[in-house]
Image: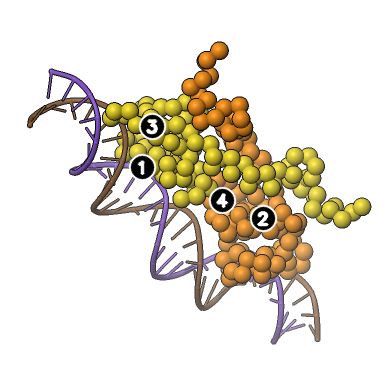
Chain colours: A yellow, B orange, C brown, D purple
Amino acid sequence: MSTFTAIADPVRRDILALLRRGEQPAGTLVDALALPQPNVSKHLKVLRAAGLVRIRVDGPRRFYSLDPAPLAELDEWLAQYREFWSGKLDAFGDHLKRSD
Amino acid sequence: MSTFTAIADPVRRDILALLRRGEQPAGTLVDALALPQPNVSKHLKVLRAAGLVRIRVDGPRRFYSLDPAPLAELDEWLAQYREFWSGKLDAFGDHLKRSD
DNA sequence: CAAGCATATTCCGTGAGTGGAATATGTTTT
DNA sequence: AAAACATATTCCACTCACGGAATATGCTTG
């Protein structure tokens, strides 16, 4: 599953936001999200398949942490559009490309 | 439909990429994408609902252009994660926050 | 080894998004 | 007004992602 579809789900974005605080066991995420445990586990599986989270196993617990690599790729994708809102070009900018 | 779900579809990302070249009529997009015209029209409708494209009507033609506002919001969302790959913090960074 | 805890997996029903085909709407031209 | 063109809309079938419930796996403790 691609990064785009992985972050399309609001629950998964909530999980990523929680992981900004640092590595956390699955149970903590379940409590914080107030969702059924299997539901959270499935979303974590999707995030892992997308490479967005890593697991560290310690006994019965799985500690999840952010893996920012796919987000860095998303940033590169977004960079192609950054000129359109960063002040260099406004909504009419494309008309003016050949104006000099 | 949110920006996240709007850009989750690869066809719609292709459309956005084409619009980086500037405003274009729907027919040009149909030709470039090599997809059935109704298919493209439906994707354009989704992009418009998400605020990602604007329409300028000129006779029978509809000229589509990028509206970068939602992408700027996506950039703000992404900015919350930028510290995780920008060199200040690596994958272990969250452990080291209080290390000084 | 039995019990309990933490987490993952499977099964199932359902709703949303997608593509294809056909058709409709609106505009220009003759 | 009819025809031709550009684009949008509707209808339909199908896949897929999501949630809920039940169950399985794996580790630990007594």
Q: Is residue A16 left or right of residue B68?
A: left
Q: Looking at the image, is mark 1 or mark 3 nearer the viewer?
A: 3
Disc number for residue B17 = 2
* Circle 3 residue: A56
Using the image, name the chain to which the residue with label 1 belongs.
A
Disc number for residue B6 = 4
Q: Looking at the image, is mark 4 or mark 3 nearer the viewer?
A: 3
Disc 4 from disc 2: Cα separation: 14 Å
**Residue B80: x and y, percent?**
58, 31
Q: Amino acid at mark 4?
A: Ala
* Residue drawn where x is 38% and y is 42% of the image: A45
Mark positioned earlier in the residue sequence (1 or 3): 1
Neighbor class of circle 3 (other Cα within 10 Å; few <14, some 14-19, many 20+) is few
Neighbor class of circle 4 (other Cα within 10 Å; few <14, some 14-19, many 20+) is many
Q: Amino acid at mark 2?
A: Ala
Task: Please name whichever residue, C27 or A6, is drawn nearer the observer in this view of the structure.
Answer: A6
**Residue A99: x and y, percent?**
89, 54
Q: Is residue D3 above or below residue D26?
A: below
Disc 4 from disc 1: Cα separation: 23 Å
Q: How many numbered marks are there?
A: 4
Disc 2 from disc 3: Cα separation: 38 Å
Q: Amino acid at mark 3?
A: Arg
Q: Amino acid at mark 1?
A: Lys
* Circle 1 residue: A42
Q: Quadrant of residue B23?
A: bottom right
